[in-house]
Each structure stands twice: as C-alpha cells, then as structure tokens.
Amino acid sequence: MNQQSGELIGRIGPYRALTRIGADRMGVVHRGTDPAGRDVAIRELPPGLAADEAGRRRLAEEIAVLRGVLSPHAADVLDGDAYADPPYVVTRYVPGRSLAATVAGEGPLRGGTLRRVALGLARALTAVHEAGAVHRDLRPGTVLMVGGRQGEPVVADFGLVPAPGAAGVGDRDYQAPEVVAGRVATAASDVYAWAATVVFAATGRPPAGAGAPPDGVPGPLRPVLEAALAPDPAARPAAGALADAVAAADLGPPEEPVAPAAVRAGAGGAPAPAGPRPGRPSPTPAAPRVELGPAWSRLLAVLTVVLVSAVAIMVPAAGAAAAVAGALALRIWDSAAARGAASPGPVDAGRALLRTALTLPYAAAVAVALTVLLVAVATVDVRTPPLWACAWGTGAGVAALWAAPGIGAPRRQLERVFTRLAPEPGRIVLIGTVLGVLAFVAVVGAVSLTPSFAPVYGLQNTLVAALERLQNALP
C-alpha cells in the first residue's frame, strides 16, 4: 500500500505497521500497533546491517542488551527480530517533535528549559551505559520533545552496529573525533555527542569541534560541556557525572518559547537571542501543559467497557444491540485513523462492517460458554437462575466484542477519543469521576436487578425454558 499517504502498510512480524514516519541510514521507521493494540514504533533495518549468521547473532545480542535500558528519558526497546528479512526493532512510540525541529522552529532553549533537556539526556545516557549499551547516534534529530518545547526529552533511535569494532553511525557534527577517525564508539563517545547536542539546544548550531570552547551557552554549563567535549575520550566525565553537574547548575526558570520570527541571524549567522521589547514587561512564562498519558486513556477506556458490559447484563437484548453498533462505529473511526484520514469514508465503513461481522462469532462463543458454565454449576449444588446466566453471558460477549485479546480496534479508538477529550489533569479527573460513578452504578444494577430482555420477551422465555431443561437434565 501507499506508505506516504498513511494507508495501512501491512504486517512486520506480529506487529501491524500503519504509517511511515521516517527514514535514514538506519532504515525505515513505521508507526504501528502490537498484538494488544498498543502504539509502537517499528524500525526496519537495512538488510546489509546483518548480512551473515554472525552479524545477525550479534544484532540479536545487542537488541537483548537494549531491552535492559530503563529510563523515562529513553524510548523502551520492546522487541526485535535479527533473523527476520529485513531485521527489525520495536520501541515504545514516542509522540513529539525532534529537538532539531523544535530549535529550528522556535529558537534555542533558555533557562530552566535548557537545563531540563540537558539533565534528561544525561540521565538517559546514564541508563544506557548502566545497561552495558552504547547509543552511538545521539543528536538533535534523535531526541524527541514530549509535550513540546516545555516538555521532557526522550532519546530514541539507537545506532545499531553489530559488526565488531564498528564505529558510530550518526551525524559527523555530533560524533566524537575518535569515531570520525574510524575508532569504536564507546560510552565516552556518547558523552561527546551529549555535549554537542546540548550546545545545539542552547545556540542553534553544533560546536566548532573537539576542545573548542562552547560559545553562547550559559555560564553554569560551560565547565561540564568543555569537559565532555575534550578530544581525549579518557578525559571526558561519565554520564552520571554529567547528570550530577547539570542538576547542580542554576539556569533560572523556564522561559517562554521563542517565536520563529524572533530567531534572527546574529554575528556569524548564529541565531540571536530574543527578548522583550524595550519598555514592555517580560511575558509571564507559560505553565507547561500536562498531557493525558497512555495509562489514563487506557483506564478510561476500561471504565467504558465495564459500563457497556454492565448495561448489557441489565438489558441484554437492547444492550447487546447498542454494543454492536458502538463497536462498529469505533471500528470505522479506527480505520480512518489508521489511514491518517480526518474523517471516515465508505472504505472505512465497509472494512469495519466486515471485521465486526467476523468478530461476532467470537463474542457469541464467549457468551454461550459463560452461560452454559453458569448453568452447569448446578452439578455442584450451586443453582444459577437461567435468566441471570443468559444476562451474564451476554455481558461477557459484549466485553469480548470490545476488548478481547486480538480485538483491539474499539479499545484503541476509545483511547484516542479520551486523549482528545481529556488533554489536561482537570478534565481527566472530571471524565474519570463521571465514568467511574456510572460504571459503579451499572455494576451494582447488574448484580442486584432482575435482567430484562425487553422488548423481545419471547426470546427471553425461549432461552430460559431451554436452559431450565438443560439444568434439570444435569446429574
């Protein structure tokens, strides 16, 4: 399919690739979903990266090492297959613009904003090195700003080089001199890349070279940056020392993002710092916007599934019909989102109708299985009223239709909806409270009220009579 248009690309191992989001010398990156419907980034590596058995074995070992990197400032490596054709690596999907794009569009970082980025990157490298790994490709293009300019940095796109003695793979402006000379990239090489990236964040340009004083950076950061840019790898501090030094530096509060029009070329072509106009007060720094995280959106989606299932237990016929219609609508919008379209079209409706039809037997099997199980417990002197068994079986079938293993579209679209509806903590609390109360009331009603198959009472009587005969026939 057409990757550039955002249409469904296909399967990469057990993962579904949805859209192509980038490409470089280390391969093509797709946004996709795992078998549980969670967002992931899938990097297909160049076929020549591991051309023989020994190369693939080393690549598999390196992927295993990277899976041990645990830091909120590093994209988690979740999976990978060095023996696939082509090999691929799966990481947590991180939304956000790159540091390079942020600085190019809004100007260099200042004050506490710069300190937060420098500290986050140092902590990410500390976690990488403690796991026994080397990043090899740290640069502004591989740092993502989650939450925008005022957000947190996350390091992504590890440079995978399985060949023994291989050098780095990144931009020469951010590579240590020993890597440029063809020597093996080490943790000290990452430290140099960290300093070069921080210099870019502060000035809008990379450093002049190893050992060159980092002009234009705040005074409190100069000593640690000069040490990290040392030509001799042995003279550079460890990543943990970088984090300690930056944490102790006082760069002031975060500043208002610099407007693109205010990024002017200064002497030597460097962006000139922007400030308030004379005679006008300095603008009040904007409070960083806390966005809805995946865990909150999933929790709200789960509450919705519980609510719908409980309603289906109280009114099985009407509840099941509404649940099927709701699952179909969510699938239509999920199909449109997978294509990158703003609104669904006939193709999305047809695809959603087909997939919903294919999942109905699955949901029906779950409903029948639980109903029969509840009736069958009469063999151990626990007699469940047939009407209740039918109702609870219907509720289980509805839950399976929306969120059973292998059925991720309705839940995934619910998460997208809640991400848009509740982008801030206040709305999270409001919507979570409303959904929680409704779900609680519905569950109480499901366990205390007599189910009703209205308006199809004939079906209710038929099912109850059949289950009573089955129950009476059991030993």
Image: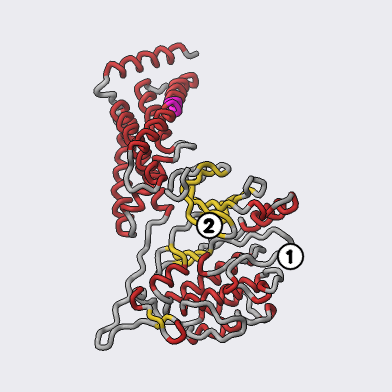
Q: Is the magenta stretch mostly helix, strand or loop?
A: helix
Can the viewer see residue 362 in this picture? Answer: yes
Q: How far apart are marks 2 and 1 (CA)?
A: 25 Å
Question: With respect to residue 61, does 186 lie above or below?
Answer: below
Q: Where is residue 25 in the image (x, y as percent from the top left)?
A: 59, 60
Q: Where is residue 35 in the image (x, y as percent from the top left)?
A: 51, 42
Can the viewer see residue 446 in this picture? Answer: no
Q: Which mark is residue 2?
A: none
Query: Could you tell whether 340 is left or right of 24 in the image?
Result: left
Q: Residue at x 51, y 86 (%)?
A: 215
Q: Is mark 1 on a helix, strand or loop?
A: loop
Question: With respect to residue 475, does 8 lie above or below?
Answer: below
Q: Where is residue 242 in the image (x, y as percent from the top left)?
A: 57, 77
Callout 2, which amino acid?
A: Ala
Q: Which mark is residue 165?
A: 1
Residue 435 shown in magenta: no
The region drawn magenta spans 361-367
Q: Residue 23 carries which label?
A: 2
Q: Where is residue 192 in the image (x, y as percent from the top left)?
A: 60, 75
Residue 363 shown in magenta: yes
Q: Residue at x 69, y 53 (%)?
A: 50
Rendered image quadrant of residue 330: top left
**Crowdedness near tag 2: few (<14), some (14–19) or many (≥20) residues, C-alpha within 10 Å:** few
**Do residues under tags 2 and 1 come within 8 Å of each other at their CB atoms?**
no
Question: With respect to residue 133, does 374 lie above or below?
Answer: above
Q: Which residue is drawn at 34% across and 50% down?
A: 418
Q: Is mark 2 on a helix, strand or loop?
A: strand
**Crowdedness near tag 1: few (<14), some (14–19) or many (≥20) residues, C-alpha within 10 Å:** few
Between 169 and 377, the one nearer to me in the picture: 169
